Amino acid sequence: MKKIISAIIFFLTITASCGNKGVTQMEQLRELMVKRQIEDRGVRNFRVLEAMRKVERHKFVPGARITEAYEDHPLPIGHGQTISQPYIVALMTELCGLDGHERVLEIGTGSGYQAAVLSLLAKEVYTIEIVEAHAKTARARLKELGYGNVTVRHGDGYRGWPEKAPFDVIMLTASPSEIPQTLIDQLSDGGIMSHVCEIRTDGSRKMKNRPPDPSKRYILY
């Protein structure tokens, strides 16, 4: 199946990437991605599924990897980073329970794909990227594609964005062994801290601190 999808995308990239037929085929590939990789694995939130259908993932991957844009795995984007597997992006987003009124802070912009998905579901998205080249590229890409409610900053994400705090949701796309207190302090009462957690070889989750503050929710996955 992967080879078939890659062949289709490669053909479209070479011959019809700018034509109406090419756009239609890309939409069909996104629909296939959403159905088989995301919905069939249990993601059910209608708004999340629609956002995954709308965001053009192939515009967030390096040109050399465009033939793999809608495949079921992460892809390298340079500087030791990856664009996450589509299912993980959808799952992370669904767990945040966004209704369109939230202010979201994302730690780890990468290519900007996750921020683009969040922008369709939240009121404001602030995203911080430590690699300057990625921050510049993502900022330009998101602006060009019309994601006007996303603001990108180059810097250390673990310091957060205090002048824009508090945030209803803070999403860490990396997998730190502990949550920085600076980020906890910038999460609103009743807010959600969502992040990937390193998995040990025995299957348990490695997490040094999980703050007990009952006014905040912590989602590990």
Image (cartoon, helix red, strand yellow):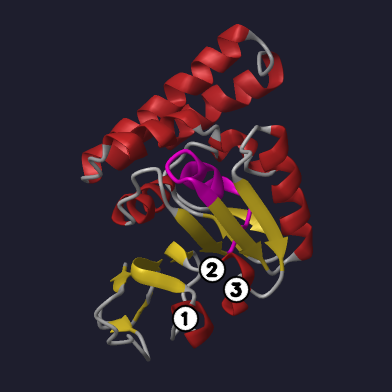
Where disc 1 sits, the SS reads helix
**Which residue is rendered at x = 37% and y = 31% of the image?**
50
Q: Position of residue 132 (x, y in %)?
A: 77, 64
Q: Which mark is residue 162?
A: 3
For the N terminus, give its image quadrant: top left
Q: Is residue 1 above or below residue 169?
A: above
Task: Assess whether mark 3 and mark 2 are in contact (beta carbons under 8 angstroms).
Answer: yes
Residue linked to disc 1 = 185
Rendered image quadrant of residue 200: bottom left
Extent of the magenta region: 108-124
Q: Is residue 180 above or below residue 170?
A: below
Residue 121 lies in the magenta stretch: yes
Q: Position of residue 67 (x, y in %)?
A: 59, 34
Confirm whether residue 154 shows in the render: yes
Residue linked to disc 2 = 165
The span from disc 1 to disc 3 (Cα, nearest Å) is 9 Å
Task: Assess whether mark 2 and mark 1 are in contact (beta carbons under 8 angstroms).
Answer: yes
